[in-house]
Image (cartoon, rainbow, N blue to C red):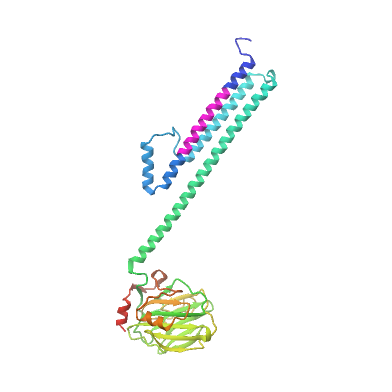
Amino acid sequence: MQGGALPPEEELKATVLQLRETVLQQKETIGSQREAIRELTGKLSRCEGADGKSAAGAWKNEVGKGKDTMGDLPRDPAQVIEQLSRTMQTLKDRLESLEHQLRANVSYAALPSDLREMLQRRLGDLERQLLSKVAELEDEKSLLHNETSAHRQKTETALNALLERVSELEKGNSAFKSPDEFKVSLPLRTNYLYGKIKKTLPELYAFTVCLWLRSSASPGIGTPFSYAVPGQANEIVLIEWGNNPIELLINDKVAQLPLFISDGKWHHICITWTTRDGMWEAFQDGEKLGTGENLAPWHPIKPGGVLILGQEQDTVGGRFDATQAFVGEMSQFNIWDRVLRAEDIMNIANCSINMPGNIIPWVDNNVDVFGGATKWPVETCEERLLDL
């Protein structure tokens, strides 16, 4: 030994002891950092489970008043994981530095082979442990980020749906006491005032159409409603044009109806039709005034068309003719996919029952108006009866 230097074996032992102490410190550091991550995750869960701003306030109070067990770790979870990763890299760098110092100060050739292998094994084990911890921390960082993003997206979706529902309810309650207690007013004979039913029809082999209407237009009340499909603009039309009688068109085939409603009073109109033999019925104020057959027999009503109130369509949804426009008011326009019994029609007309159409019900959010057509609260059914 020269200058009091330790023999190589003693230097190696000292180095191994130092490495062991470093490993123990590293394990303690990882343990404390994992505890910090668990604490942060718990706080995040409590924050997410709370309600809106109150949860945010409770989080701030907890951070401001409670004991800070996180030390100097940042409170953002992504920053926490990044800092832990940096700590792991620092420990690995220190280990490599110790290994380089050992190689510089000690001749490996002078060491016993079994001691040299043991040292290499210890160094390899420590490096694998460090890499494993860094990988675990990266996985936890990714998982925490994904869970936070998914929870935020789910919360935003639920809030948006709730806001839309509230808006619909506010809109629905703003004008009418009930969604069906309104009428559409079409005061002028033009080609731009009309209403549109948002829903369309399925394929039908029978139907009943009922509505309340009031008109004193002359000559003819015009077109209370029309249904057009691609290839057939006159799939279903109810029209009184000029001095002609009221007509029902099915697939451009015509039947004249014995209805008389242009006296400026409210009237309840129902029309039934079935593809079987093309049979039809016409009711006014609950009474059957006419019936017939051979109106577009065996022709199913085509689906997916456009249903317009107040105008006759020459193309699907357009090309209105002012001379065929309806002038007046209408309400309770309902369509069923079957022929209603005469008893049911009478009960609807005399206000004994309220029976919405199972295909097209009369509800505010299913009817749009255009060109100056308006919606107004409608008289009660009993008031309309008194007007007959």
* Left or right position of 27 against 309: right
Depth check, front residue: 185 or 43? 43
Q: Is residue 35 magenta?
A: yes
* Left or right position of 205 against 219: right
Please report the residue visible at 61 percent of the width from the left and 24 percent of the height from the top.
Answer: 99
* Left or right position of 320 against 85: left
Please report the residue visible at 43 percent of the width from the left and 75 percent of the height from the top.
Answer: 357
Residue 327 makes an appearance in the image: no
Q: Point out residue 103 in the picture as x, y percentages from the top left corner.
A: 64, 22
Magenta span: 18-39
Helix, strand or loop for the magenta stretch, by majority:
helix
Q: Point out residue 102 in the picture as x, y percentages from the top left corner.
A: 62, 21
Depth check, front residue: 231 or 148? 148
Which quadrant would residue 24 be assigned to in this image?
top right
Q: Measured along the vertical axis of the image, is residue 126 above or below residue 373?
A: above
Image quarter of the C terminus: bottom left
Which quadrant would residue 189 be assigned to in this image?
bottom left
Image quarter of the N terminus: top right
Please report the residue visible at 48 percent of the width from the left and 81 percent of the height from the top.
Answer: 236
Please report the residue visible at 37 percent of the width from the left and 69 percent of the height from the top.
Answer: 179
Q: Is residue 16 magenta?
A: no
Q: Measured along the vertical axis of the image, is residue 307 above or below residue 44?
A: below
Q: Point out residue 132 in the picture as x, y percentages from the top left corner.
A: 58, 35
Residue 357 makes an appearance in the image: yes
